[in-house]
Image (cartoon, grey):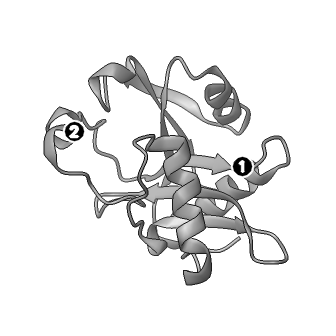
Amino acid sequence: MASPIPAHALEDAAALWWRHFGGWGGVDPCRAERGVVALDDAGRVLGVAGLRDAGGGFAPERGGLLRHLFRAAPATGDLVVDGIAVVQGRRGIGRALLAEADRQAVLRGRPGLRVEVRASNAPARAFYEATGFQEETRGRFGLPWWGQVLVLRRDAA
């Protein structure tokens, strides 16, 4: 685990994250200090988690129409896990990334971790609930076509 993301892994980590959460064909630069990466012994990216707080997130804000359509979830003092993406699931990488995000929350003086997940994303909801997150609120956050979004939270360890 590494945070900030090492320079040699940042491009691959960003590509993995954008494949899961961007979906618009390009890979925008991401901020190493706003992410956590899982690397194998050869330094290859196994997974990445974005981190976000009031100072921004792993991915820089997009401009244009999307920026005007986006509706933020309620403000928080928690560290927000802004998506976890893994190369291959069910190997413990997601849990390890979440553990490192928890460590980062403590280091940064944040009281807990928060995630915002689409209500329709049953696998992600199950993962977060199995790792101790509980629903805090729900609403139509993010982009209008995302539908209902759940805000889940747990205390930092």
Left or right of residue 119: residue 41 = right
Q: Amino acid at mark 1?
A: Gly
The image quarter containing residue 75 is top left
Residue 61 x/y as whole percent: 27, 55
Quadrant (top left/top right/bottom left/bottom right) for the C terminus: bottom right
Are there few (<14), some (14-19), or many (20+) residues within 10 Å of tag 1?
many
Q: Are marks 1 and 2 in contact (CB under 8 Å)?
A: no
Point out the frontmost of discs 1 and 2: 2
Camera-nearest residue between 39 and 152? 39
Left or right of residue 145: residue 118 = right
The image quarter containing residue 97 is bottom right
Residue at 52% of width from left, 65% of height from top?
A: 35
> Residue tagged by mark 1?
94
Camera-nearest residue between 51 and 79? 51
Q: Amino acid at mark 2?
A: Leu
Left or right of residue 107: residue 88 = right
Numbered circles on residues, count: 2
Between the C-alphas of marks 1 and 2, the distance is: 28 Å
First reached walking from the N terminus: tag 1 or tag 2? 2
Residue at 72% of width from left, 49% of height from top?
A: 94
Hey, which residue is sitting farthest bottom in the picture?
7
Residue 121 x/y as whole percent: 57, 23
Camera-nearest residue between 93 and 27? 27
In the rendered image, the vertical position of residue 45 relative to residue 23, given as above or below: below
| Label placed on residue 15 | none
Quadrant (top left/top right/bottom left/bottom right) for the N terminus: bottom right
The image quarter containing residue 99 is bottom right
Element on which disc 2 rests: helix
> Residue tagged by mark 2?
66
Residue 147 x/y as whole percent: 38, 17
Residue 40 x/y as whole percent: 81, 70
Residue at 19% of width from left, 43% of height from top?
A: 67
